[in-house]
Image: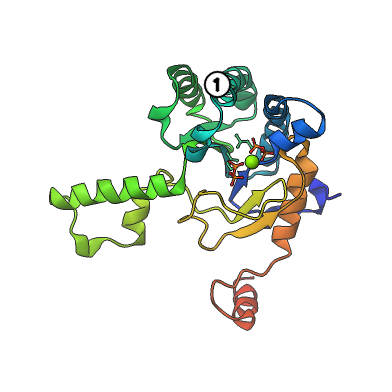
Amino acid sequence: MVSKEQLDLKRLPKHVAIIMDGNGRWAKKKGNPRIYGHSNGVAAVRDTVEAAAEIGINFLTLYAFSTENWNRPRTEIDALMSLLVSTINKETKTLLENNVRLQAIGDIGSLPNSVAKQLKGAIEKTKRKTGLNLILALSYSSRWEMLNAARNLAEDVQQGKIDSEDIDSTVFESYLNTSGIPDPELLIRTSGEFRISNFLLWQIAYTELYFTPTLWPDFRREDFYMAIANFQSRERRFGKISEQIVENININS
Ligand code: IPE
Ligand code: IPE
Ligand code: MG
């Protein structure tokens, strides 16, 4: 077990992203319907958000519903959407108490009105909070996001707002849903699956990946700290060699 005290709070990742996976399997193991797993995933979200806010993480992005998840059985989608409405409704108070600002990425227009309304309300209520930025990825997929960016960029080029020669990483990023949000330094996926499932493909170019067999409803702050401790034990080289990294640390300290 890793406790908060074992973390180097001066070297925290600014942005942690999580693929919250394994709700269905968790429920099945207990002989319950899949939605039971989703409902129990809320406690994991609460604990993780509180832990992130408490230690001083700036951005936490949670993959809650992907574009591809629209292909699930209607009953599961409906149950997930109702759960979203009730959770956002119930948890807004806790977000305010923890100085958390809520944001969302994804095709929000494709969500049922009840979800979009609840979400927009919570975003509005928390918009002046200055602590953790909690970003929910809803009806999100990275290819959707990048195609959208390419389309909007092409339109702006056509209208003469931008010269195609001037398109660089910074310009392209400004067309993504995550514009203004730094790239995650750490990406966690629960449930023992080793894939990205169309999440933040551009943004994770140099992100450290952490996979844990823990199913999402069982994930708690200790698991979160463990992922961060693991992150802190890694050397991030960004294409350079180890000696250059060590040199840099010595120069900067
Ligand atoms: C993650 O759990 C939650 C969503 C994708 C909405 P799953 O529902 O994918 O659970 P498993 O992977 O089937 O166990
Ligand atoms: C990824 O989980 C999406 C979310 C966690 C919201 P999935 O369970 O949908 O991913 P795959 O289908 O196993 O790759
Ligand atoms: Mg899954």
Q: Position of residue 252 (x, y in %)?
A: 60, 71
Q: Residue at x 62, y 44 (%)?
A: 19
Q: Height in image: 145 above or below 96?
A: below
- In this figure, what is the number of numbered marks? 1
For residue 134, above or below residue 203: above
Q: Which of the 4 image quadrants contains residue 217?
A: top right
Which residue in the structure is indicated by mark 1? Answer: 78
* Residue 229 x, y percent position in the rendering: 75, 56
Which residue is located at x 70 percent, y 66 percent? 234
Front-lying residue, 150 or 240: 150
Q: Quadrant of ligand 2?
A: top right
In the rendered image, which quarter is residue 28 located in? top right
Q: Quadrant of the C terminus?
A: bottom right
Which residue is more in the foreground, 24 or 124? 24
User: Vertical placement of 26 versus 182: above or below?
Assistant: above
Dot 1, crowdedness within 10 Å: few (<14), some or many (≥20)? few
Q: Where does the image place residue 146, in percent across and percent down from the top left? A: 37, 50
Residue at screen point 53% across, 36% down: 69
Furthest residue toward right? 1
Q: Is residue 179 visible?
A: no
Percent x, y for residue 23?
70, 35
Mark 1 belongs to which amino acid? Asp
